[in-house]
Amino acid sequence: MTKHRAKPKAKSGKSAKSTKAVTKSKPKQAVATLPAPVTQPSAQARSGNGNGRKLNSQQSVNSAVKSICDIMRRSNCAGAMQYVPELTWILFLRILDDTEREEAAASRATKTRFTPSLAAPYRWQDWAAPEGTKRTELQTGTLGQFFDFVNKDLLVYLKGLGNRPNATSRQKVISQIMSGVERVRIDTEKNMLDVLDRVHSLRAEDIDDTHVFPLSQVYEGLLLKMGEKGNDGGQFFTPREVIRILVQVVNPKVGESVYDPACGTGGFLAQAYQFMVKEQGDNLTPTQSDTLRSNTFFGREKENLVYPVALANLVLHGVDRPNLWHGNTLTGQEIYGGLFTHAPASFDVILTNPPFGGKEGKEAQTRFAYKTGATEILFLQHVIDSLNNGGRCGIVMAEGVLFRTNETAFMQTKRKLLNECDVWCIVSLPGNVFVAAGGGVKTNLLFFNKGKQTEKIWYYDLTDIKVTKKNPLLLSHFEEFFRLLPTRADSDRSWTVTRAEIEAKGYDLKAVNPNAKNTEDTRTPEELLDIIKQKGREVAEALAALRGVTKQRSDPSKIQIKIPGR
C-alpha cells in the first residue's frame, strides 16, 4: 500500500551479526509432550479451508489467510503491525522451499548443479511441513523443544547466512528478511503448529490460478491491513490505485533501472515489475526475464520493521534479487548495504511516495544544496539528483510543497526542479486519498523528465471527488485523464500553465482550476446583515406564535371540551 508517511519516526537499528548455531541435546523427561506427529499431511494440512478441497475461489484463499491471521491475533500478535511481519517470514520460508524444490528438479532434468540456500534441518520441508523429519522429532520430544529449536537454532542459522563467506544474493536476502526476528511472537507451540499447517496448505498446486489471484496479491491484502488507520503502518503504505496510476503514466521499460528512495513495503517496485512483465507479454526473453528479476529494481528503506517486509514482498512478486538498501536515505547512514552493491549511481525511472511532515537534522541537510529540515524537500532534491538525463519520475507530493513560497529552500528546490527537469503534468488528488492510513494531507502526483527545463505544465483536477474509506479513489476516476493525456487537451478538469505564469507567482505550483464553478459568495456585508435581520424577525414572529399556543394550552379555562352527542 505501501504507505503513507505522514510523520515518520526516526529509529536506529543494527545489522544482524553472524552467530554459530548451537544444537543442544536434552535428556528426555517425563513431562507433557506435543501432539503426536502427522506422518502424512492431513486434509486440513493439504487445504487451508479445512476440508481438503482445492482453493478455487478468491474468497476461499482469503478465508484461508484470514484463518491464519485469526490464530495469530489471539496468540500475542493483536495488531497487523505485529502479525504481518511474523507471517511474512513464515510465508517467505514456505515459498522459498517450493521455489528451491522446483529449481532442484529442473537442474536434475538438465544435469546441472544446484546448491540449495538452506541445509537440513533448516528447510521448511524439514521443520515446518506436517511430515517433516525434524518436526516429527520435535513433536515427540518434550514440551518447549519445538520453540527451543526455532528460537535458538533456526533463527540464528537463518540470520547468519548473509555473513558467510561467498554467501549468495539469495542467502543475503534470507538473512535480511530474518534480521528483525528475535524470537517467535506466537504464544504457544500448539498455535504455532496450527499456523504452520495452514501456511503449508497455501501451495501453488492447491490454488486454482484460473480464478484466484496469486499469493503475491494475497500478501498485498495483508499489507493493506498494515496500512489501515489504527495499525500505525499507514506511513509505509501507498494506496494501490495511486501506485498503478504512477506506474502506468511513467511506463517503465525492460532494460531500464527503477528506483524508489523511500520504498516502504515495496509497493511501487512490485507493481512496476508486474507492469513490465505484462507489457512485454510473450515477447519476454529469458535474458530479459533474468534482468527484471535480478538487476532492475532498487530501493532504500530506513525502518527496521518494514525493510524485511519489502524484501519478502518483492520476492513473492517474482523479483529474485531485490536490490534494497537498509538505512537513512537522506543522511546516508547505512544499516545494511549488502544487497545494494551493484546499484548504479543514477536511475532511468524513479517511482516514489517520500515521507512528508517529517524533520531531519543538520546531518542530512549538509548533503543537500538547499538546507531545510523538511523531509519532502530533501527527498525531492535527492530524486532530481538521482535521475539519469532523460530519466522519468512519478512522485506523490504534499500540496504544501507546491504552494509554499515563503521559505527559501522550498522556492530554490522548485526552481531547481523546473530548471533541470520538464515537469509536464501535475494531478491534483482529492482530499482523504490516504484516509485509510490515517493521513489527511492533501496530495498531488508530479510527473517530470530530466534533461530539459519546464516551459509549461498540464494540470488535471480531481479535487471535487469525495473520497472516504468505503469509497476510495479508483482507476475509473482517471478515465478522462488517460483519454486527454496524449494531447494534454483542456477540459473542465484540465488546463495548461506557462513557465512565465509560474515565475510570476513566485514558483507557486498549486493546482487552481480556472474552469471550476465559482461557489464564492459575492454578497456584500451589508446585504448579509439585512438578510440576518430579516431572518431574525421571522424567528421572533415564529417564537411569539409558539408561545401563544403554549399559553393557551396551559390555561384550563380556555380549554374547550366537546362531549360527544351534545
Image (cartoon, rainbow, N blue to C red):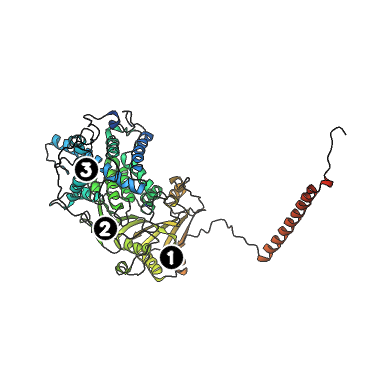
Hey, what amino acid is under mark 3?
Answer: Pro
x, y percent for residue 460: 46, 55
Answer with left or right where residue 92 lies relative to residue 554.
left
Which residue was labeled with disc 1? Answer: 499
Hey, what amino acid is under mark 2?
Answer: Gly
Residue at image position (31%, 52%) is 306
Q: CA distance from mark 1 to mark 3?
A: 45 Å
Instruction: Give the image quarter of residue 122.
Output: top left
x, y percent for residue 158: 19, 47
Hey, what amino acid is under mark 1?
Answer: Arg
Give the secondary structure at mark 2: loop
Answer with left or right where residue 267 lies relative to residue 492.
left
Q: CA distance from mark 1 to mark 2?
A: 45 Å
Q: Which numbered disc, 3 or 2, marks the residue that appears first in the sequence?
A: 2
Give the secondary structure at mark 1: helix
Instruction: Give the image quarter of residue 106.
Output: top left
Comparing labels 1 and 2, the label whose residue is closer to the camera: 2
396, 50: nearer the viewer: 50
For mark 2, does the 10 Å Cα neighbourhood hold few (<14), some (14 to 19), or many (20 or more) residues?
some
x, y percent for residue 239: 40, 49
Comparing labels 1 and 3, the label whose residue is closer to the camera: 3
Q: Which numbered disc, 1 or 3, marks the residue that appears first in the sequence?
A: 3
Picture disc at residue 362: none
Which residue was labeled with disc 2? Answer: 13
For mark 1, does the 10 Å Cα neighbourhood hold few (<14), some (14 to 19), or many (20 or more) residues?
some
Which residue was labeled with disc 3? Answer: 286
Q: Please state, as top left, top right, bottom left or bottom right, where the C terminus lies in the image.
A: top right
For mark 3, does the 10 Å Cα neighbourhood hold few (<14), some (14 to 19), or many (20 or more) residues?
few
